[in-house]
Every structure is written in structure tokens, then in C-alpha cells.
Image (cartoon, grey):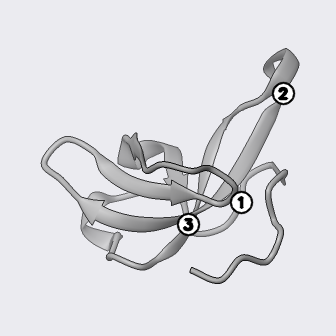
Amino acid sequence: MNKADIKIDNILYWNTQGAYQTNISLKCKVLDIGDKYIWVMVNGNLSPTPLDSSKLSKEPLYKVTNNRHIEW
């Protein structure tokens, strides 16, 4: 995803690998946009996570494993 298209408070998906190298997507909310990283709060995690914008997408690319409803 292009960094210029990302806005604070966007709900995006982090496309990564889970157990046994299976591809998964994790729902997250953008907290801050830095020079090097996009800081997101991953649904179900307790602390912010720094990510490269290339690992984010507006739609999930794989099975979403943390899609519970959480009020942000």
C-alpha cells in the first residue's frame, strides 16, 4: 500500500505469516505515520506495532484471524 494513501484512524489489514508459515491478515488501526514506520494498534494486542507500509492493505489478502469487534 502506498504510504500517501494511509491516514490516521484508518482500519487496515496487516498481511503477515502466522503459525507454520501460513499467510494471515490481522485487523489494525493506524495510530501514527512516521518517517520510517506506520504505527498501528493490532486488534487484540496490548501495544502499538511499527510496520512497513508495504505489509498493509485496505482489504484482507488472507484469512483474518483477529476479527472480533472491538471499540477503538
63 lies above or below 32: above
Q: Local crowd at mark 2 within 10 Å, few (<14), some, or many (≥20)?
A: few
Badge 3 or badge 2: first in the primary sequence: 3
Q: Amino acid at mark 3?
A: Leu
Label 3, secondary structure: give it. strand
Tag of residue 12: 3
| Horizontal and vertical percent position of residue 36 | 19, 41
Indicate which disc, 3 or 1, sits on the residue closer to the N terminus.
3
Residue drawn at point x = 32 percent, y = 52 percent: 38
Q: Which residue is mark 2?
A: 22
Q: Which mark sits nearer the N-terminus, 2 or 1?
A: 2
The percent coordinates of residue 72 (x first, y second) are 56, 80
Q: Residue furthest left?
A: 35
What amino acid is found at the position of numbered circle 2 in the picture? Thr
* Front one among 47 and 59: 47
Residue 67 is left or right of residue 55, and the answer is right
Q: Position of residue 35 (x, y in %)?
A: 13, 48
* Three-letter code for the amino acid on which mark 1 is drawn: Pro
Q: Which residue is mark 1?
A: 60
User: What is the spatial separation of the Cα atoms under label 2 and label 1, in whole angstroms?
Assistant: 14 Å
Q: Are marks 3 and 2 in contact (CB under 8 Å)?
A: no
